[in-house]
Amino acid sequence: MFPSFLPSQVNQLKDIEAIAFVKSIERIALTTSLSQEPILTTYIHKGSGITPILLLHGFDSSILEFRLLLPLLATQNETWAVDLLGFGFTQRQKQIQYSPNSIKIHLYKFWKTLINQPIVLVGASMGGATAIDFTLTYPEVVKALVLINSLGYTYAPTWSKYLFPTFNSLAVEYLHQRHIWALNIGSILPNLEPKVLLAIQCAMLHQEMIGWHEAMISYVKSGGYSELADSISLLDKSTLILWGETDDMLPLKDAEKFHQDIANSRLIKLENCGHTPQIEQPQMTSQHIFQFLNYRKL
């Protein structure tokens, strides 16, 4: 049985590994300063090890983007993934203003409640910006960083051209409709690879959660991580930068800038890989993370 809090569309999943991953999603009520009611927060926890790994997903995404990477990491490490506030399957409450600051407050509460020891923080795309912001605020919590095609210098991907201030609602609906269009087209193409259809299903499942539309508008209005760039050079944590060379959302020059500005960093460029190495090359991504952890003795 799937967790009861997930949208009914979850029953359309056919991939055995994806089904097993989704069935392992858990939920906890976190009391924060953001609202009077606890926030029902979704996460996955697998494996064991000395230093836990915490995975942070990208914009308009969920922990499902780690369905391939997390099980690999969990073979050697205690590994967590959490749906950030306003995203994924974590509860959205009307009274909360969704912004990098509220995301950070919620994330700290999650860490404090369930992990409460220093971690290796892994952030993909927007999750990378979240990881940087979190580390700068709570340096005692983070032992090391892994940034995967991270947001930071180019503060918004290419779809941001659709986000005009007076058309936020329309722009958010565009994000929803593009996934529906892709799913509808994909379902009638006879030669479409099953993994492509699965990727579309996983990418849009969280959009059926109550409050998705309103939370997305709230986050867009906050400006996101547009002011993060000037703070990146302040990072003093050992950092692994993984970057798909064919990323069509964030420029490769951003990877070089991360490497230049973060003093204790290593950059690895992944050939024949785009914006999501955790999905496109999970084996290679996990190997690089393991090598990084072993070299740093984490």
Image (cartoon, helix red, strand yellow):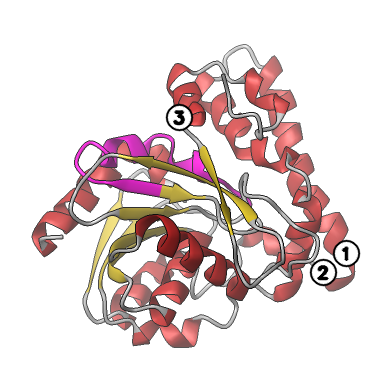
Q: What amino acid type is highlighted by mark number 2?
A: Phe
Q: Is residue 74 magenta?
A: yes
How crowded pointer 3 is (Cα within 10 Å; few <14, some 14-19, many 20+) is rated as: some
Which of the two marks, 3 or 2, is nearer to us in this view? Answer: 3
Judged from the image, the secondary structure of the residue bearing numbered disc 2 is loop
Judged from the image, the secondary structure of the residue bearing numbered disc 1 is helix
Q: What amino acid type is highlighted by mark number 3?
A: Phe
User: Marks 1 and 2: CB-CB under 8 Å?
Assistant: yes
Q: Is 95 positioned to the left or the right of 284 in the image?
A: right
Q: What amino acid type is highlighted by mark number 1?
A: Phe
Q: Is 16 positioned to the left or the right of 92 in the image?
A: left
Question: Disc 1 and disc 3: Cα gap in Å?
Answer: 36 Å
Question: Disc 3 and disc 2: Cα gap in Å?
Answer: 37 Å
Q: How far from the left and from the top, in percent, is residue 286?
A: 26, 44
Judged from the image, the secondary structure of the residue bearing numbered disc 3 is helix
Q: In this view, does 224 lie above or below 66?
A: below
Q: How far from the left and from the top, in percent, is residue 182?
A: 69, 32
- In magenta, the rendered stretch is 60-80
Front-lying residue, 90 or 15:
90
From the image, tell me which residue sits under label 3: 21
Please say whether residue 29 is visible from this viewpoint. yes
Task: Tell me the number on the disc at residue 164.
Answer: 2
Q: Residue at x 51, y 80 (%)?
A: 228
Q: Does the magenta stretch include residue 47?
A: no
